[in-house]
Image (spheres, helix red, strand yellow):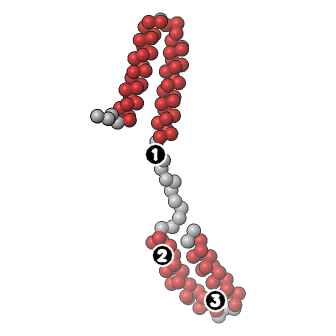
Amino acid sequence: MMMPPQQQQRDEIQRDLQATLAARRELGTEYDDNFLDALAEKLTAQAQRAVANAPRDQPPSNRLSRDQRAGVAICSRFFGIPIIAITVGNGPWYFLGAIALIGLINLLATR
């Protein structure tokens, strides 16, 4: 039967701690700094492996959804028709400006 990875890691850390304590009992307290350094290195490596293997979340998207893009298209046509009708009577530059603005809004909504 296969143990889950977390259980295996826990067992490995426990074995390392037991071996460190046993070695300390045999060699005495003058090697405490060496044991602590070795243990710190093992725990740091374990933590780095855990971080490297952790699943990554997808960054949030700033893009409009398909339904939102459809809403922009519908609104631009709904409001665009009267805006274009008003600008036609004011001259060609207003008309071209309104067309360009509506086109720009729709272009930005598709990105």
Residue sitting at 63 percent across and 84 percent down?
99
Please, what is the three-letter code of the amino acid marked with disc 2? Ala
| Rendered location of residue 62, percent (x, y) | 53, 61
Disc 2 from disc 3: Cα separation: 25 Å
| Rendered location of residue 1, percent (x, y) | 28, 34
Q: Is residue 66 above or below residue 24?
A: below
Disc 1 from disc 2: Cα separation: 33 Å
Please, what is the three-letter code of the amino acid marked with disc 3? Thr
- Compare marks 2 and 3 and give the one earlier in the sequence: 2
Residue sitting at 54 percent across and 80 percent down?
76
The residue that mark 3 highlights is 87
Please identify the quadrant where the C terminus is shown: bottom right
Q: Nearer the viewer, mark 1 or mark 2?
A: 1
The residue that mark 2 highlights is 70
Residue sitting at 48 percent across and 30 percent down?
46
Q: Which mark is residue 55?
A: 1
| Rendered location of residue 63, percent (x, y) | 53, 64
Q: Is residue 31 above or below residue 109?
A: above
- Left or right, 79 with respect to 2, comes to right
